[in-house]
Image (cartoon, rainbow, N blue to C red):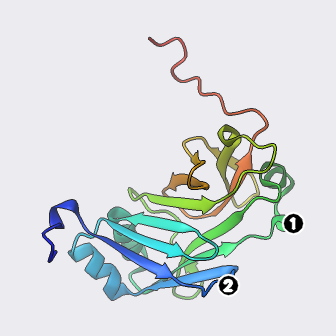
Amino acid sequence: KENGNEQNEITVIFHVVTGGRSVSNVTVNLPKTVQETIISKKIVNTIVVVDNPNIRINMDLATVEEINRQANSDVNVTATKGDNSQLSEEAGEAIGNRPVFDLKVNYGNGRQVQNFGDGRVSVAIPYTLGPSEKAENICAVYIDGNGRVHWLTDSVYDSEEKVLRFSTNHFSTYGVGYKEEALVFTDIANHW
């Protein structure tokens, strides 16, 4: 605001510093008063960046509004490294030993904000390709409560930054999946 950049819209970044240690669980508290400030100041992006694991969670304004509407209280945004050995058979085949994270927004006595309505959350999960893996075969997956795998075909693996990027409107368990054959998009087949 002081530099006259307000027209570029405002982003708030919560940087979680782990002191170089690898942690399996990260929690960022988002008090109700902070949520209301984000909403009243129309802050377009609220980003949680964690040092190690180097995960990035970007919540748009509509997401914070929906969290505030549903929870109406302080919330915790958590990212927990999953235990690959606990995955369902289907999820285990898709993810293997690649990273998997359980993402949640908790409030009250064990309650969760499951869906962000019109809001979108962009997530970046760090991943370095294995020796025989192709970037085009890497795809984000989400695992539902029944252990079924849902391939997020609009996810993108960034070979330069070595991260898998995807967008979602709900939190769940997400992982880095791999298909032996790259996903084929047929929605524009035979179109000029």
Identify which residue, 62 or 10, lies in the foreground.
Answer: 10
**Residue 11, image x, y percentages:** 31, 69
Pick whichever, 88 or 177, lies toward us.
177
Q: Quadrant of residue 67?
A: bottom left
From the viewer's side, name the closer residue of 132 and 66.
132
Which residue is disc 1 drawn over?
A: 85
Contact between marks 2 and 1 (CB within 8 A): the answer is no
- Where 159 sits versus 163, above or below? above
How far from the left and from the top, in percent, is residue 176?
69, 54
Rounded to the nearest angstrom, the CA distance separating label 2 from label 1 is 23 Å
The total of numbered circles placed on residues is 2
Q: Name which of mark 2 and mark 1 comes first in the sequence.
A: 2
Q: Residue at x 77, y 43 (%)?
A: 133
Circle number at residue 56 = none
Question: What is the three-letter code of the residue carrying label 2?
Answer: Arg
The residue labelled by disc 2 is 21
Which amino acid, mark 1? Answer: Ser
Query: Which marked residue is nearer to the observer: mark 2 or mark 1?
Result: 2
In the depicted structure, whether residue 113 falls above or below residue 30: above
Residue 159 spot, x, y in % from top left: 60, 48
